[in-house]
Amino acid sequence: CWGYFSENLNNNSVTLNNPCGFNVPDPEIGPAIAQATLELEREAADPREVTGQEKAAAHVGSTITPLDLNGDAVMDVLIGDVSFSNLTALTNGGTVTDGLMVAQDTLFPVYDLSVDLPIFPGAYFLDLNNDDKRDLVVSPNGTSLCQNFESLWFYLNEGTDDAPVFAHQQKDLFQADMIEVGEGAYPVPFDHNGDGLMDLIIADHGYYQAGGNYPSKFLLLENTGTVNSPAFTVVTDDYHDLSTSGIGQSMYPAFGDIDGDGDQDMYIGDQQGRLHHFENISTTPVAEFQLAQPNVTDANSVVIDVGQFATPQFFDVDGDGLLDLLVGERNGNVNYYRNQGTQALPSWNLEEDTLGGLTVTEYWNITGHAVPFMFLNQDGEREMLVGSESGAIHHWTGIEGNLTGPFTLADSTFGDIDEGMRSAVALHDFHGTGDLDLVTGNYRGGIGFWRNDFSVGIAGEVDSDPLRLFPNPADEGVDVVLDRPAEHGSRLQLFSSQGRLVLEVPARGQRIRVGTSQLANGIYLLRMTGGPWEAVHLVVQH
């Protein structure tokens, strides 16, 4: 019983000068842990089965940081508790060989800003500024019901290494210099101002709020760079004030023109597995959304409900020119709703509740948290990346002409990228190179940007590039110049980044003009078909 003190079984109060009469000569902790585990399992199954005394026995968990607080060469200790937000400092009045805690500071450091960090704070004594004096960093020792965006408190040591005096500096060490959206981060490409440069919406599970009712928000990162050199600027951390929409936690957006008026509308998936339609009512290129239909319904007027944690994406899955709807969910599968309506009025019919037979749920778990992102590869064929609860990104191929069959799992650890649990993924050519870059999110609340030095998908063997495009970026149109005259039946097809065929013209001669003035700004995929060869190029409309 080092220090002769004990912590209350029901809370974080500390008793000093405890004779430790409960000690035994040769303690065996194995049975005690087993008993506590059994009691916790029983309480989870039915809280009424566990008595008050058993609950007290199950109250375990403290963080312990030994350090010399007053320069007397004996170790004092900082203690954080599993259910509280403060640190308690215990002063050692004993010796090096015989510790005895004689005083406590329950509002440590009482002489400065006291630690108040929900919940279960842990303290770390280390030199952060290389002045040979260790400082103090405090952070939650948990992953839920914890402060999640101002969760790294920094205290500068203004004393000595042997007798530190801690002065609070900030609550968001490192976090202030990075993208931090609380708990969960889900990047979704969206050109919010129609300037042809792809912006990013970063959705989240929520920001910590006392009581556990986290508000979910959308962070808008506007691309203020160029077609070849992206640069992102934070515009707002609560896009369109959606935190007040009443949708709740884990909002996840999808953007697409589903009413045929030429602008991007928005669906938002929620934690309950439902979708909400926001129409873009703007008369300018800058999007402005208005709730058009809460709880979106399918073709049978039944509310779409995929279970929990709906993550939608608009994409022309079947190649009929209409945006369909993919929705990931907590169980780890992806739902496919085919649009059997028109370009002006969608009608969603559930074709597959487990598209391609795919699941990202690992064998050791019962949930998977699928976040789908379908795209066109360099051959103009559909592939899909899916984020997962484990953090791995899954890559699926074999989709073309196989919507009712099993897809091919090409890679269960795509790119060997693993940035932590609850991964989310999005693709876009942010550098104008023709290759898709990768943006990832994770449950810690941060995002990663991966520039692509290789092509997603497997391209066929090509002796030489049969066509050239100019100007590209385009404004009024782009000229397609072939290395030899097009054969009879050859065609040029232009696809949006969501896989929708937006333009198709016959290819005749060696120079074909493709008008683009009617297209919204953005990146398109130009494919030439027919004849002895095929070619695919990216076109930037700006």
Image: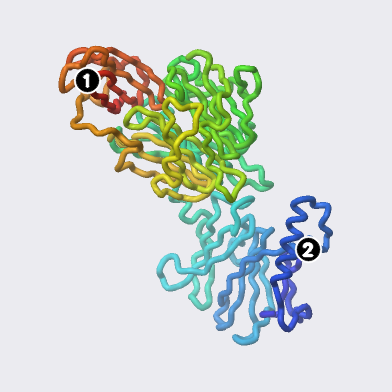
Residue 482 drawn above or below residue 359: above
According to the picture, the residue beneath numbered tag 1 turns out to be: 480
- Residue farthest front in this picture: 405
Of 30 and 441, the residue lying toward us: 30
Secondary element type, mark 2: helix
Instruction: Kindly report which numbered mark, 1 or 2, lies closer to the viewer in this rendering.
Output: 1
Q: Position of residue 329 (x, y in %)?
A: 58, 36
Look at label 1 and name its amino acid: Val
| Residue at (70% x, 80% y) in the render | 1
| Percent of width and height locating residue 280 | 50, 21
Q: Residues within 10 Å of mark 2 (few under 14, many from 20)?
A: some
Question: Based on the displayed image, in which of its 4 quarters is residue 381 positioned?
Answer: top left
- In the figure, residue 459 lies in which quadrant? top left
Total marks shown come to: 2
Q: On screen, 323 above or below 52?
A: above
Of the image marks 1 and 2, the number of the one nearer the N terminus: 2
| Relative side of 60 to 334, left or right | right
Of the 4 image quadrants, the one containing the C terminus is: top left
Whether residue 182 is visible here, answered yes or no, is no
194 relative to 23, above or below: above
Residue at which label 2 appears: 56
Q: Nearer the viewer, residue 215 or 163?
A: 215
Look at 67% across and 60% down and name the residue there: 82
Where residue 132 appears, as percent x and y from the top left, is 42, 73
x%, y% of residue 49?
A: 83, 54
Please, what is the three-letter code of the amino acid marked with disc 2?
A: Ala
Q: Nearer the viewer, residue 317 or 530?
A: 530
Distance, label 1 to label 2, CA atoms, is 76 Å
Q: Secondary structure at mark 1?
A: strand
Badge number at residue 98: none
Residue 243 shown left or right of residue 482 in the figure: right
